[in-house]
Amino acid sequence: MPHHSRGLKDPKQQSSEQGWLFEVAPPPWEGDAAEEPLAEVVFPSGPEGEWTYLVPARLAGQVEPGRRVLAPMGRGDRLLIGYCVRVEYAVPRGKLKSIRQVLDEVPLVPPKLLALTRWLADRYLCPWAQVLETVVPSAVRQRAGTRLTTLLSVPPDVSARLNDLKLPAAQTRVLRLLAQCPQPLTPRQLAFEAGCTQAPISQLRRKGLIRTEHRRLSRFEPQEVPSPPDAPHALNQYQQAALDLIRQAIQQRRHEVILLHGITGSGKTEVYMHAAAECIRQGRTVLVLVPEIALSTQIIQRFLRRYIGRIAVWHSMLNLTERLYEWERIASGQVDIVIGARSAVFAPLMNLGLVIVDEEQEAAYKQDSFPRYHGRQAAIERARAARCPVVLGSATPSVGSFYNVRRGRATLLTLPARAGHSELPDIRLIDMRRVFKKKNTSTFSPQLLIALKENLERGEQSMVFLNHRGYSQYVQCYRCGESLVCPECSISFKYHKAEDTLKCHICDLRQPMPEACPHCGSKGLMHKGLGTEKVFGQLQRYFKDARIERMDRDTTTRRGEYRRIIKDMEDGAIDILVGTQMIAKGLDFPGVTLVGVVSADSIINLPDFRASERTYQLLTQVAGRAGRGDRPGRVIVQTFTPEHPAIHAACTHDYQKYYDFELEMRKAGRFPPYTRIVNCIISHEDQQQARDLAHLLERLFVAEIEAMNSDRYKGIMGPSEAPFYKLHGKYRWFTGIRGVSLNEILAVVDNAWKKLTPAEQRCVAIDVFPANML
Ligand code: ADP
Ligand code: ZN
Ligand code: ZN
């Protein structure tokens, strides 16, 4: 394993449940004069590894884990910024240099988070310092746009006796308003909200009914909380059973991985919210991870409207000031719930009592740039350190999570029925081979068209799902057979009709649609393969009076457009919604009674061992959008391979059978979860060099495996051209290792990598537990 500690104390053991801000270094051994405070420092832009420094007396107490320092490095004693990761009293060995300066007033990373970053560095083979640099937002490092601000809130004991207080009318109004606010307000905000002067506010502050805090705050003002309030549902028996178990684990401060498998519409979100409320009642905080903020507005809105606690929404769209504002609110204990995408797993919450990972199977949890960590895995590790339960929720759990249940590493909770009165929809498979045999080459089967028509007549809503955006998937010349390919990416251009443009969906390169084939000059260019733009146009022609909308990444680029479409769907102002994955997951529109899947086969043939799992999950998710309200739903799935087990299982709601099948396949093929994979992607502008480097790496792997002398299974994958052979102008190869022992294959890859030159290392991306093999 890389980055070995040098026998110093593990920050995990300095566990303190409260107040990492006040953590101090342990006192020296009495009477042992030879021991001195030593600090271990890691450098983001310096040599790898942990470096030991003396702490000069004038900085004693200031140098502590999580704070950054300036320290000399190398022969010239160049001063570098580093993170102090450990402080301990020990006898210095050899001549040590001294820390020069401490840069932060408080630790940027609490001890448990520090331990998490260390775990992440080891697990995903990245230098610790660089992990820290990604975890601590740059805004926090720079303290962008801050000033000291006064914030007002109502203490809980005052809230409790609001009705008994005898106060003048204006003060009563102000106090009630503030008590209802989920977040503290500035005096100016409060006066504005209450429509009053500062006088009643000052009175209340003087009487001690309003709590005042001064904090370094950004200029960012928090956004308003949406209304109307979302009232809790009484839980059904399955939800209640799930809640009971989660509550127990919270109370007993027991770490447990809980897989909440609830069919679509079974009320998982409701369970999350009840569990979160319970956790907050016990005075502890909650972390909720969602796969992608943009696609999770519905669940976030529901949390915000439920008023169970003070919420921070953490996502990549925050600007520097907003990010700092939220970070400081969280770090200073003014937030009960953090909801966010992957990187929210590093939110500096204290006293964590519950972690929730919604849609745990989503590949979006895996970061596809450095450091390539998995948000779900990091969440589990964080919960382990906090000794609290982590709930992995999904209608279609990952095969790996299911396997963990079988191995006794996770507890399974099942919500087998839909909440309320609705039932799972009827799913009908349409064999498109038969449709085509009757010389019907249209996008839609007669069955789907009839169903859409019936739905329109009944005034019910429909969704039509398709995996691709744009108009056509590729443009092909019918004389020479060549298709138009992005010169940077070796991937076919997609045609976008509205702009009459060819676009590369990888690098976003755009070119005008040519008049003639660039290879042979023929005018016969054909559009092949369907995209949402084309399907949308076809539906408009079939159903002239229907209100049809399209939702994909092209139609939602304008800010607020995604929310607008969601709202129109909720209000019943849309009859048919056509869209990509964006409409497939998580959305809850009770009015939708029909879902049409244009082609179930779109991802099943990708060269990835998870292609079948993804197909099963996607189909189950899309189908789950139908019939969530009072009226029953139906689903029509068009496919050329109705016999495929993933498609068949999704349509019969038979998940047991599907997971059994999939696990068998994985076992036979030696794929995860039976093995672990560490993949290396080699990219280079030069084809030959990419190839050579891949082969060099493979030889190094072979040598390391032999040197390891262990008989546990290890197999080398590749070297071969990656399925996406050229991306962004670089040629890509891959080679990797799979094996039963993660530590062994990590060691092999790490050792091999260290034998490369720095220039070669820069061309290699190490991907531990890759989410895709493309
Ligand atoms: P999931 O997240 O499992 O897909 P949701 O939490 O979105 O399901 O719940 C589906 C619908 O059922 C929502 O409209 C929700 O308000 C409603 N619901 C949830 N729990 C209950 C309940 N116990 N009784 C009635 N309706 C419920
Ligand atoms: Zn041609
Ligand atoms: Zn491209």
Image (cartoon, rainbow, N blue to C red):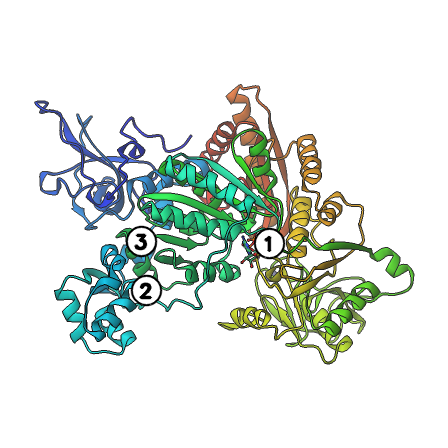
Tag 1: amino acid = Gly
Q: State which tag comes first along the sequence, 2 or 3.
A: 2
Instruction: Determine the CA span between mark 3 and mark 1.
Output: 31 Å
For the residues labelled 2 and 3, the Cα–Cα distance comes to 20 Å
Tell me which amino acid carries mark 2. Answer: Gln
The residue where tag 1 is placed is 265
Seen in the image, is 584 located left or right of residue 258? right
Q: To which residue does mark 2 refer?
A: 180
Q: Name the residue under label 3.
A: 330
Numbered mark located on residue 351 in the image: none
Point out the residue furthest to the bottom here.
Answer: 545
Q: CB under 8 Å between callouts 3 and 1?
A: no
Q: Indicate which label's residue lies in the foreground, 2 or 3.
A: 2
x, y percent for residue 80: 25, 47
Whichever of callouts 1 and 2 sits on the residue coming sooner in the sequence is: 2
The amino acid on which the numbered mark 3 sits, given as a three-letter code, is Ile
The CB of the residue at mark 1 lies under 8 Å from ligand 1: yes
Q: Residues within 10 Å of mark 2 (few under 14, many from 20)?
A: few
Q: Which residue lies at the image location 34% right of the left edge and 48% below the top edge?
A: 281
Q: Is residue 704 left or right of residue 113?
A: right
Q: Where is residue 736 in the image (x, y as percent from the top left)?
A: 58, 36
**Among the 4 quarters of the image, the one containing residue 582:** bottom right
Instruction: Measure the C-alpha gap from mark 1 to mark 2.
Output: 30 Å
Q: Can residue 153 be seen in this view?
A: no
Asked whether the residues under the numbered discs 2 and 3 touch, taking CB atoms below 8 Å apart as contact, a structural biologist would say: no
Tell me: 570 left or right of 13. right
Q: Where is residue 772 in the image (x, y as percent from the top left)?
A: 59, 46
- Front residue of 94/657: it is 657
- Residue 236 in view (yes/no): yes
Residue drawn at 15 percent across, 37 percent down: 55
Q: Quadrant of residue 542?
A: bottom right
